Amino acid sequence: MSSRDLILGRVRAALRDAAASEVPRAYRSAGTDEADIVLLVDRLVDYKAVVHREQDVAGVVTSLEPGRLVVPPGIDRSWIPADATIVEDEHDADAVLTAATVAIAETGTIVLDGSPDQGRRRLSLLPDLHICVVRQDQVVASVPDAIARLDPRRPLTWISGPSATSDIELNRVEGVHGPRNLHVVLLPPAPARAF
Amino acid sequence: MTFLGMPATAPRGVGNLRGEEPFPAAAHKALANAQLRRNLSHATTTIRGKSGAVISELPDWQELRDAGSALKAATMARLPELLEQLEAKVTAAGGVVHWAADANEANRIVTGLVRATGHERVTKVKSMATQEIGLNEALQAAGIKAVETDLAELIVQLGHDKPSHILVPAIHRNRSEIRDIFLREMPGVDPALTDEPTELAAAARRYLRETFLSTKVAVSGANFAVAETGTLAVLESEGNGRMCLTLPDTLITVMGIEKLVPTWRDLEVFLQLLPRASTGERMNPYTSMWTGVTPGDGPQNFHLVLLDNGRTAVLADEAGRQALHCIRCSACLNVCPVYERTGGHAYGSVYPGPIGAVLSPQLTGVADNASLPYASSLCGACLDACPVKIDIPSLLVHLRNEVPHPRSERVAMAAAAYTMDHPALYTRAQHAAKLSKHAKRLPPPLNGWTASRDLPEPPAETFRDWWAKR
Ligand code: SF4
């Protein structure tokens, strides 16, 4: 007998008396609350991200003195400063500039899904500075709202503040293996497109 | 425990589910270690405060707990079908699914997979399952080096130590002990390293960077697996998880069969419960989710090892089954008066604290961990803290009824545990210990459990009272 059949057989034998039950979902589900931008900013800052509420992304990037910058292939070219030093390989980069897919106000979380303007996962992992551009129409209120928007078939990275650890005396300390500096540029909503 | 047909407990002679000595003997040593107790008390006090604060921000915390608890019960009831669904989805997305009936088989599978890559080093991101089965030891025996990348695991590995907490395996170490371990054991460390937590974190960053970049195989655990989509999720803080999950060519994930959730939507419950109950954060810094293989992004070879190792035996016990609902948040450890005094090593198993006191004996069979169901005062703080509402006190009582123990030992254990939760009695016991010139031991029935003069300060109030006020 294969281990697969052995385990499934054991599980079936073990569960002879189990009955399926209802799952109560009285918690706040998707669509309960409005996305609150002020709350998002508050939560991002609380976990040591720096927030810029600016139109001029390139200006913010320049002001952060990014050094060698890496960008995903589908990035909005207008976000890249004219005099930026762009490198091809994230190993050589000091900073990375990406877009985002969803931001969750209640938890101060940004989710990347590997779209062309966010790039493959290692791109936003190796550089020490991550500048992430979020449009206001990407902001949702809660975790259930985010789950409802995301596509699980894509590789997802949920980011809440810079890299940190709780391993020393159970306190949060920023700056371990991921980017030690997270800057979020919050843009106004994108203009409605005609279809 | 009633065995219905085939379900089997975890085998002996492999893995880390059985201690070398019974809980009372091990706890006795731990109680003599005042530094350990100070470290634990400091850390658990910190985390209780943080966790309480972020939990109180959510108006629907109780409703989330109700949903989480019911979701786990519903998952167990449909486990065979959901496991088959997960297998089909992961396979369709380019992954390979393996089934391991016990620790030996899981170790064999993973060792074989690593060997097949031709590499002799793997990076690891903290996984309770691989500690449970003793994977590092098995890899080492096969000439493969496993590098732990989680900061706490690194502290444990460099300190030639054992984990003592589910979430923070080095919780028994304070910052200056960590600095000393780094200075002694970390190649290339800056001799001027201070015990500032940011400096310690930076030292770990420097030390592991090259290893992350050059290692081609990683082994991980998983917090959740979604049957409906085949999606795996790892919640972490430092970014070492992201490194392990995205940089190597080959990723091997070892996961207990109980880690499933039925649908993608179900994650909306657990992604709220787990961070707030575990590290006391609204959200942990990084969560990675992946479904099979993504061309051009991350490991192009993905293996998922589904582990039984006693879980079906737990499942077979109708009353005990809920121990498998555990999402390893460690909240029950952080509120437990017994854990706070003895630390995690006393439990002997990789699963310490209240959940360990029920899960370890269930996985191994009660006879092999007979003293653990007594490692509790039954104060009820663990049940109140548990985000999926596992009734640990009732499980402990249930398991005590299965222990083949002499009555006298039961009495000693129960009395000692009871005393822990009753300040007046505890103070008297402490006094008795201090005043006793002839004997270091407490008067019976407490002498079976603790024989230390260095008893901890009693809590000002019982844990039940303390918790009720929160
Ligand atoms: S039993 Fe509950 S509180 Fe304890 S670790 Fe598991 S989920 Fe957390």
Image (spheres, helix red, strand yellow):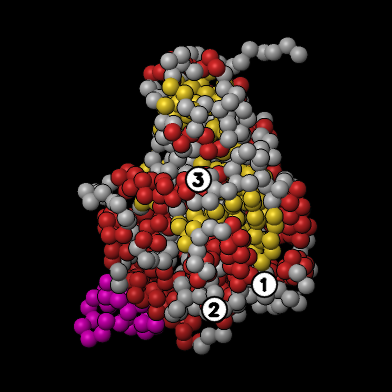
Point 44% across, 31% down: residue: A93
| Residue labelled with disc 2 | B13
Question: Quarter of the image holding residue B365?
Answer: bottom right
Q: Amino acid at mark 2?
A: Gly
Magenta-drawn segment: B428-455
Q: Residue at x 52, y 66 (%)?
A: B139
* Quadrant of the drawing holding the N terminus of chain B: bottom right
Residue B25 in the figure: left or right of residue B284 = left
Q: Is residue B180 left or right of residue A161?
A: left
Q: Nearer the viewer, mark 2 or mark 3?
A: 3
Q: Chain of mark 3?
A: B
Cα gap from disc 2 to disc 3, whole angstroms: 33 Å
Residue B97 location (% of width, % of height): 70, 57
Q: Nearer the viewer, mark 1 or mark 3?
A: 3
Which residue occupies 67% across, 54% down? B260
User: Which residue is denoted by mark 3 in the rendering?
Assistant: B243
Query: Are tags 2 and 3 found on a single chain?
Result: yes
In screen coordinates, is B107 left or right of B140? right
Magenta stretch holds residue B163:
no
Of the numbered discs 2 and 3, the one sitting upstream in the chain is 2
Q: Residue at x 31, y 59 (%)?
A: B185
Q: Quick check: is the Cβ at mark 1 less than 8 Å away from ligand 1? A: no
Describe the element under mark 1 as helix, strand or loop: helix
